[in-house]
C-alpha cells in the first residue's frame, strides 16, 4: 500500500474514533441497472428554505456528513492436523482477527457526494503462536493491514449524465459465487471459500461516466490503477508449491490503462446488459526465466472481453444468464495465445416462506485446446465446469439467517469442491454473531487436491455503529 494512502487511512480511523458512535449512520444504497453500483443521491431540498430567526430547520435536508462503521471479530479453528508446504503447522486456532471499518460520506451542493471508506485489522494469533513459525509473506498478508477501500466523488455533471471518480466497485456479474462478466475488480482470495464474492471485491480507482436515456444506461470506464487478486502467500496452508515465484506486475501508465464499457436496459420483469473490456488478466501465467531459481516467473497478460447478461423474473422464479468471450489468454506451455468462451445459466426460486434456493452452472471452453495445456495447474481439459447450489433461510422473526453453499468443479466433482454451512443471529439491530463450518473436497486437479485437510470452523461477532 502507498505510504500516503496508509497515512490517510490512519487519519480516517482516528477521526472516526473521535466522533464516536453518536454520528448518524447511512444505509448502503442498493445496486441498480442489472449489476452496476449506481448510487443516485436524492435531490437536495433547495426550495422552501426557512426564513427568519425562528424558522424551523428543514427536517428533510441531508446532513453535511455521515459517519458509520463497524467492529468485527473473526476466528477460525482448523480441526484437522495439517501443515503448509513450508512446514508451518496450521492445526488449531488459526485466526483471531480484529477489524475496524469506517465510512465517511459528505453531501455536497449540486447533488455531489464524496465517500471515504477504509479498514484496518490486526491478528494477535501470530504473536501467540510464535512469529518465527510463519513465513515473512504470511506475516505481511495476515498479521495486520490498513487500506482505503471506496474513495470517490460522485454526482450529476450534466442532465442525465453522472460522473464518478476514485476507488470504487463496479459489479457486472449476477452470481454470488461464480465470475463470468464480473471482471473489473480484483478479489481478495487469501482464504478461499470463506465468504461470497460481494465481500471479496477490491475497490479500484476508476473514472466512470453514465449517460441515462429512457430505460437504458450507457457507461464508459477508464481504470488507471492496476490491482490484481490477493492470493494465498508462500507459507499459507492454501499456497501450492515448494517456493514462491517472482510475480511481475505491469505498472500504472497511460498505455497500461484498462478500459471498459457497457449498455444496460431495465424493464418490468427483465433486464439485459452488454459489456466489453480491455484489461489485464488477474490470473498470471508462468514464463520461462533462467535467472529465477525455479526457472519461471509470473506475468499478467493483457486480454479483452466481450459479453452479455440478463435476468428474467416469472412469478417466484428468477432466471439469469451470462456469456463472455475472452481473447488473447496466455499459458505457460505454449507461445500461442488462446481464446475462451464462458457461459453461465442460473435459476432461483423464492416460493418457500422465508427460504430460497438457487442453482448456477458455468462452463468454460478453451478454443484450439492443446494437450500440453493439461499439465498446467489451472487447465485440466478444454472444457471445465462449476456447479453451485445455494440455500438460504430466515427464522425466528427474521433474526436467524442460515446459508448452505455447495460448489462442485466438474460435472461429477472430479476436480474437487467445497461446502460451507453458516448461521447468523441478530442479537440486536446493531450486533450480529455467527458461526459455520467449511469443508474442502479433494479432487484430481489443483488446487482442491492440495486443500483436502484445510477444513475449518469459523465464527464472528460484528457491531455496527
Image: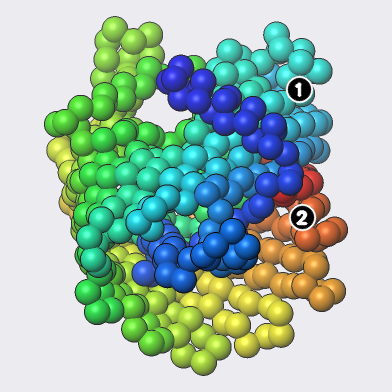
Q: Earlier in the sequence, mark 1 or mark 2?
A: 1
Residue at 32% x, 44% y is 165
Q: Position of residue 414 (x, y in %)?
A: 52, 54
The residue indicated by pointer 1 is 124
In the foreground, 385 or 5: 5
Crowd class of label 1 (few under 14; some 14 to 19; many from 20; radius 10 Å): some
Q: Position of residue 181 (x, y in %)?
A: 34, 58
Judge whether 262 appears above or below 327 on screen.
below
Q: Horizontal placement of 82 versus 450: left or right? A: right
All told, the count of numbered labels is 2
Q: Horizontal placement of 170 versus 26: left or right? A: left
Secondary-structure class at tag 2: loop
The residue indicated by pointer 2 is 430
Q: Position of residue 133 (x, y in %)?
A: 71, 13
Secondary-structure class at tag 1: loop
Residue at 32% x, 70% y is 309
Judge whether 163 appears above or below 214 on screen.
above
In the foreground, 239 or 173: 173
In the foreground, 228 or 45: 45
Q: Quadrant of residue 52?
A: bottom right
Q: Is residue 331 visible?
A: no
Residue at 74% x, 57% y is 422
Judge whether 45 appears above or below 180 on screen.
below
Amino acid at each position: 500500500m502507498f505510504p500516503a494512502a496508509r497515512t490517510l487511512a490512519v487519519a480516517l480511523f482516528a477521526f472516526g474514533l473521535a466522533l464516536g458512535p453518536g454520528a448518524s449512520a447511512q444505509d448502503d444504497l442498493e445496486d441498480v441497472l442489472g449489476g452496476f453500483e449506481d448510487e443516485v443521491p436524492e435531490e437536495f431540498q433547495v426550495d422552501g428554505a426557512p426564513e427568519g430567526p425562528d424558522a424551523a430547520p428543514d427536517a428533510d435536508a441531508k446532513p453535511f456528513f455521515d459517519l458509520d462503521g463497524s467492529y468485527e471479530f473473526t476466528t477460525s479453528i482448523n480441526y484437522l492436523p495439517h501443515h503448509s508446504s513450508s512446514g508451518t503447522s496450521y492445526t488449531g486456532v488459526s485466526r483471531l482477527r480484529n477489524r475496524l471499518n469506517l465510512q465517511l460520506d459528505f453531501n455536497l451542493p449540486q447533488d455531489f457526494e464524496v465517500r471515504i471508506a477504509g479498514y484496518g485489522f490486526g491478528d494477535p494469533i501470530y504473536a501467540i503462536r510464535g512469529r518465527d513459525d510463519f513465513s515473512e509473506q504470511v506475516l505481511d498478508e495476515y498479521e495486520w493491514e490498513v487500506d482505503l477501500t471506496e474513495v470517490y466523488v460522485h454526482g450529476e455533471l450534466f442532465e442525465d449524465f453522472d460522473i464518478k471518480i476514485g476507488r470504487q466497485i463496479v459489479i457486472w456479474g449476477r452470481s454470488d459465487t461464480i465470475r463470468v462478466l464480473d471482471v473489473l475488480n480484483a478479489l481478495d482470495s487469501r482464504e478461499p471459500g470463506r465468504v461470497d464474492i460481494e465481500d471479496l471485491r477490491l475497490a479500484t480507482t476508476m473514472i466512470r461516466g453514465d449517460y441515462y436515456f429512457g430505460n437504458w444506461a450507457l457507461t464508459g470506464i477508464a481504470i488507471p490503477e492496476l490491482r490484481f487478486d490477493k492470493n494465498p502467500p508462500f507459507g499459507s496452508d492454501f499456497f501450492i508449491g515448494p517456493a514462491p515465484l517472482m510475480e511481475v506486475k505491469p505498472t500504472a501508465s497511460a498505455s497500461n490503462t484498462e478500459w471498459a464499457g457497457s449498455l444496460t436496459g431495465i424493464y418490468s420483469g427483465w433486464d439485459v446488459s452488454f459489456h466489453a473490456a480491455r484489461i489485464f488478466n488477474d490470473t498470471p501465467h508462468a514464463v520461462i526465466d533462467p535467472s529465477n531459481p525455479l526457472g519461471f516467473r509470473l506475468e499478467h497478460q493483457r486480454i479483452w472481453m466481450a459479453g452479455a447478461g440478463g435476468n428474467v423474473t416469472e412469478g417466484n422464479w428468477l432466471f439469469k444468464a451470462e456469456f463472455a468471450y475472452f481473447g488473447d489468454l496466455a499459458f505457460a506451455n505454449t507461445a500461442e495465445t488462446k481464446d475462451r468462451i464462458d457461459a453461465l445459466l442460473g435459476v432461483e426460486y423464492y416460493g418457500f416462506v422465508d427460504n430460497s434456493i438457487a442453482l448456477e452452472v458455468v462452463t468454460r471452453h478453451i478454443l484450439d485446446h492443446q494437450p500440453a495445456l493439461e499439465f498446467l495447474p489451472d487447465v485440466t481439459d478444454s472444457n471445465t465446469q462449476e456447479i453451485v447450489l445455494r440455500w438460504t433461510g430466515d427464522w425466528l422473526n427474521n433474526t436467524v439467517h442460515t446459508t448452505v453453499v455447495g460448489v462442485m468443479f466438474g460435472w461429477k466433482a472430479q476436480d474437487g469442491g467445497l461446502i460451507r454451512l453458516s448461521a447468523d443471529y441478530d442479537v440486536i439491530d446493531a450486533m450480529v454473531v455467527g458461526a459455520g463450518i467449511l469443508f474442502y473436497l479433494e479432487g484430481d486437479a489443483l488446487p482442491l487436491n492440495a486443500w483436502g485437510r484445510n477444513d475449518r470452523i469459523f465464527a464472528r461477532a460484528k457491531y455496527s455503529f
